[in-house]
Image: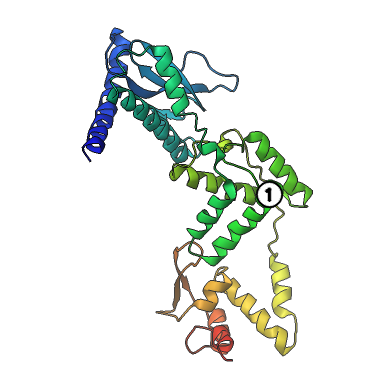
Amino acid sequence: MLVNVAKYGYLVYLRCKSVANFMANLQHNTITDMATVSIYLDTRRARKDGTFPVKLYVNHNGRFYIKTEFSSTLKNWDRNQFSKTEPNHKARNVVLRNLINKAENAIYDLEKENRLRGISDKRLKDIIEHAISNKEESRRAVLPLFDEFIDSKSRNGTKEFYLSTKSKVEMFDKNCTFGCIDKKWLLGFDGFLQSKGLGVNTRGIHLKNLRALFNYAIDEEITNNYPFRKFIIKKEETRKRSLTVEQLRMFMDYPCGRFLQRYKDIFMLMFYLIGINAVDLFGAKGIRDGRLEYRRTKTGKLYSIKVEPEAMEIIQKYKGNEYLLDILDRKSVV
């Protein structure tokens, strides 16, 4: 108990001292006996893509830097973290904080054993690099965590959404780990999906689902690996499939039998209610003050739609008991 309290107190001390010591040491070139760690954007030399490397700045006997997998532009950087303009900045900042935690834990362990003061910068650099190397985490299998991630979702539709992606990953590389997935792996997975006849946007959905899994793994401190940093998920514009005014008029005037008339009426009702989703329409309970108010199932957003006379005519035609329409009333009868 006392050890845990001491460790916590020391880590808090490190956090408070790190930024102040970092700035002071840059200005005065002082040497302290307390090792501190901070995040540093090394702007001395830009990379070919115009970004600068993000490093750990360590102050011990002298100053030294430790590379990370990240880089940033000046525009997307805010003091010691990615700014809101950086894509997926939250996930990346979590990774940076995890690196700081691992480095500070390594320093604390040396201090606890009274080894820190006598250790060289080179040796301390090796120890910190080993602490943040993530070798154990890199062997963590992807598929079992995919199951955990899916179980964390409450909606069945969302679960099926991710289960589809999991099955694709399993078909491509059932033994994949978080450490082995990099840009090359993602390109191979994208090619595999394409070979199965999936279009650009469908492949993008599966890749976004996999990216969501990595964000979850980072939040749970399971991995620091983020292969989507340099991987662009492609997207292409699709042909607009909306009806013209003339086509809609032809549909409204088209004569059809009683069986098809019901489906035609429901389609027109959705149109009159500004494109309401079927699950929201069929689950609606009633109308208040001439308006249909409902919270969209998919997003939770509240809608209030004026019910025009054309829509009211269809609603009265298929008026339900428990629900606005008799669709679910009919389904509940066995």
**Based on the displayed image, in which of its 4 quarters is residue 331 positioned?**
bottom right
Q: Is residue 275 left or right of residue 24?
A: right
**Based on the displayed image, in which of its 4 quarters is residue 59 positioned?**
top left
User: Residue 79 in the image: x percent, y percent?
Assistant: 37, 26
User: Residue 37 in the image: x percent, y percent?
Assistant: 35, 23
Image quadrant containing the C terminus: bottom right
Colouring style: rainbow
Q: Residue at x 28, y 31 (%)?
A: 11
Q: Residue at x 43, y 35 (%)?
A: 93
Image quadrant containing the N terminus: top left
Neighbours of disc 1 within 10 Å: few (<14), some (14-19), many (20+): many
Of helix, strand and loop, which one carries label 1? helix
Compared with 209, 324 (above or below) is below
Compared with 300, 67 (above or below) is above
The answer to whether residue 130 of the structure is visible from this angle is yes
Q: Residue furthest left?
A: 2
Q: Residue at x 50, y 83 (%)?
A: 324
Compared with 243, 74 (above or below) is above
User: Residue 206 in the image: x percent, y percent?
Assistant: 63, 50
Compared with 291, 57 (above or below) is above
User: Residue 263 in the image: x percent, y percent?
Assistant: 67, 80
The answer to whether residue 41 of the structure is visible from this angle is no
Amino acid type at image mark 1: Arg
User: According to the image, label 1 marks what residue?
Assistant: 203
Q: Residue at x 56, y 34 (%)?
A: 229
Q: Is residue 259 left or right of residue 126?
A: right
